[in-house]
Amino acid sequence: MSHQPVAVVGIGQTHHKKRRGDVSIAGLVREAASRALEDANMDWGDIDAVVLGKAPDLFEGVMKPEMFLADALGANGKPMFRVHTAGSVGGSTGIVGSHLVGAGRHKRVLSVAFEKQSEGNAQFALGGGKGGSIGAGGAFAPFIRAYIRRSGAPEDVGWKVAVKDRQNGAKNPYAHLKLADITIDKVRESPMMWDPLHFLESCPSSDGACAVVFTDEDGGKAASKPPAWVLATAMKSEPSTFAGRDPVSPLGAHMCSAEIYKQVGITNPREQIDCAELYVPFSWYEPMWLEAHDIAAPGDGWRMTADGDTELTGSFPVNMSGGVLSSNPIGASGLLRFAEAALQVRGQAGDHQVPDAKLALAQAYGANAQFFAMWAVGSSLDPLG
Amino acid sequence: MPRSENDIAIVGYAISPMLRRTDQTETMMMLPVVAGAIKSAGLTKDDIGFTVSGSCDYLSGQAFSFVSNVDAYGAWPPINESHVEMDGSFALYEAFVRLLQGDIDTALAAGVGKNSNSDPSTLYTIEMDPYYLTPLGADPWSLHALQYRALLDSGKTTERDVAELVARNRASAKENIHAQVSGDYDVDELLAADYIRTPLRRHDLPPITDGCAAVVLARGQKAYELCERPAWITGIDHRIEPHLPTLRDLTTSVSTTQAAKGAGLDAGPVEVAELHAPFSYQELILAESLGLDADTQINPSGGALAANPVMATGLIRIIEAAKQIIENGKRRTLAHTTSGPCLQQNLVAILEGDE
């Protein structure tokens, strides 16, 4: 959709942990950004503009932190932009950065997203700051129960997602949770948090950051490592709640992916897309998003999970990185999805690489399952050609 | 006349009443303003290709405050939408860049701030570096008193010059229906007021304002379909400076000069400049950093001293500069917006009307 082609030529992320007490917030974002610049074979001076994304400022208790982070991100004398679109913000941060290049405003743009949840109280902030929070799990569990009732999915589908994503995460050197020995039994026997979600079906709370360097067509072709080409971007929003809305399979989610498929020329996403990073903070969101993004037919998403199709070696791998279930620095979680999709088509995903991935999809969602950000990236500008 | 399909103009706008305190929610404040801006461009909500707003959770007093604001857009069926934790002028910047992708030809940008919820002297301490400055209680009054002192010590101005500037802005604001503070003031009486932080007096501070604003942008030929005399955004750029005030020369604004160059100010004179100077003396720093001469009329609206709904104040500067073209027939105007302590971040837009 961009006016001119945009390439991802640098990707960096921190080691995500429960508490990164070894660095300040500035140190955390600089760690990710430095790795992205190194990957792009660039220096701070090569960057023309910086875009910063994070979830609510109340998470760390710093208002508009991009102000004090300008120094750490080498932004002085440059444009610095701050995005906040709830849980989808990491995705939006990538999209806004890519648009700055796509519009011809800048040649090289650095998008950075972070959350340092150990410096605040995310549960307090998730409840609107008034402390009366039911938590994200409490908000989404009713949608999940409705999905199970509608689809007739067996109860072990959620457990399988929890196991699969943690096994993938164990292959990712940056992942927060490394639970290589996780089993279905361990998930089932872990404490019930928000029925039907057990403890091990829930995302962790992480400190972490992710950074992506964008450049134009010439820059992409001249890059020292293979680029990922941004083939399509889309953002959709809908109201939090009203009787005409289906929060289990939101219209905005369907529209967002439909726009991506149209831009890329995808007519059969299940067959044409090689792998996907979907924002799955609670296990059951894997089958729910497979349906809401029309990768699976309504009521059939859980069959893909149950049949092992979404495993790293399956026919449609989902969350190769280990996903949000393995690392969840909230503001960065969306950009981590977008970055993993790009790593896959660049062939740079290491032990969690899907062989010969040419076209990858990434998604992030936010608030009451009402904000959606997506992109598709390819190993070439025409991976379906 | 026809400009290229990549040229983008302001074709509609709306500004809310500027109030010291409202009991409305942000969503309630935005609803008539968003509807008004869309209507002023002769459109309906379904015609808008992209919507983006700027607001601040800490001003609203709760996390995710902008989430309910999508109700003000009538976001059903779902819409293309984004949000920045920045002034609405930066939302306009995102809308500008979004339009340049070429697939849509209209966009709405808004800014909203319910500033009555908080006490600025405590709230803005957490906008500072959380490890070194916030624990010291580095509040805006103290920081800006230091900046004002540095300006006085540089010999560039006097307290009387600044008091005259305040009186001029408040007098200009008498003609502005969106002003919260306006009227005729005697300079000697202003100078007789006590300091709140030497050399800052209360009249050097912006008022605390609840308010919002919205604009409709259109790309290419669409702008002529929606507006008789579109205000073309011929240049827009923004820059940031080091956060620590001690790392900057506070008597000048390097990032404003950089942004003005990027926006193409050098190409010719501007008849009107709407400068976002929340603290009175900052207007002088900005005028010098922009190289404005006596022929440029500064802040006919009264500026941020007349009304300061933080998160919309900057967007209102752009609207005021656009009104000069759309309604007053001016040829070339400038809008400036700022964010952060002591003018840390600055945006400059150049607006032009057709010959």
Image (cartoon, rainbow, N blue to C red):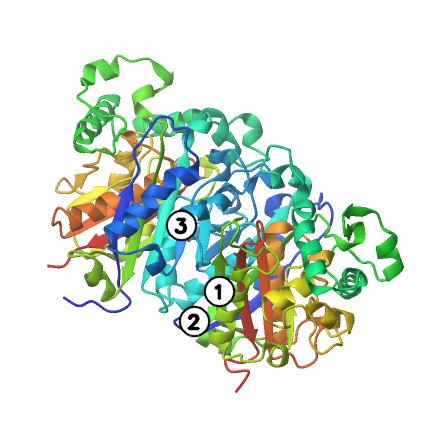
Sequence-first tag of 2 and 1 = 2
Q: Secondary structure at mark 1?
A: strand
Question: Between tags 1 and 3, which lies in front?
Answer: 3
Q: Are marks 2 and 1 on the same chain?
A: yes
> In whole angstroms, how far apart are the C-alphas of marks 1 and 3?
18 Å
Disc ID at residue A1: 2
Is residue B31 something one can see in this rendering?
yes
Q: Please give the residue where the numbered disc 1 appears in the rendered image.
A: A234
Residue type (three-letter) at the residue carrying disc 3: Tyr
Q: Are marks 1 and 3 on the same chain?
A: no
Tally of marks: 3
Horizontal side of B164 relative to A268 (left or right) equals left
Question: Between tags 3 and 2, which lies in front?
Answer: 3
Q: Nearer the viewer, residue B229 or B37?
A: B37
Q: Chain of mark 2?
A: A
Q: Secondary structure at mark 3?
A: helix
Badge 2 density bin: few <14, some 14–19, many ≥20, Cα 10 Å: some
Return the x and y of residue B348 as percentages of the image width and height: 30, 49
Q: Please give the residue where the numbered disc 3 appears in the rendered image.
A: B73
Residue type (three-letter) at the residue carrying disc 2: Met
Q: Nearer the viewer, residue B154 or B338?
A: B338
Please say if A265 is above or below B129: below
* Residue name at image x 70 percent, y 64 percent: A151
Mark 2 and 1 residues: CB-CB less than 8 Å, in contact? yes
Horizontal side of A34 relative to A237 (left or right) equals right
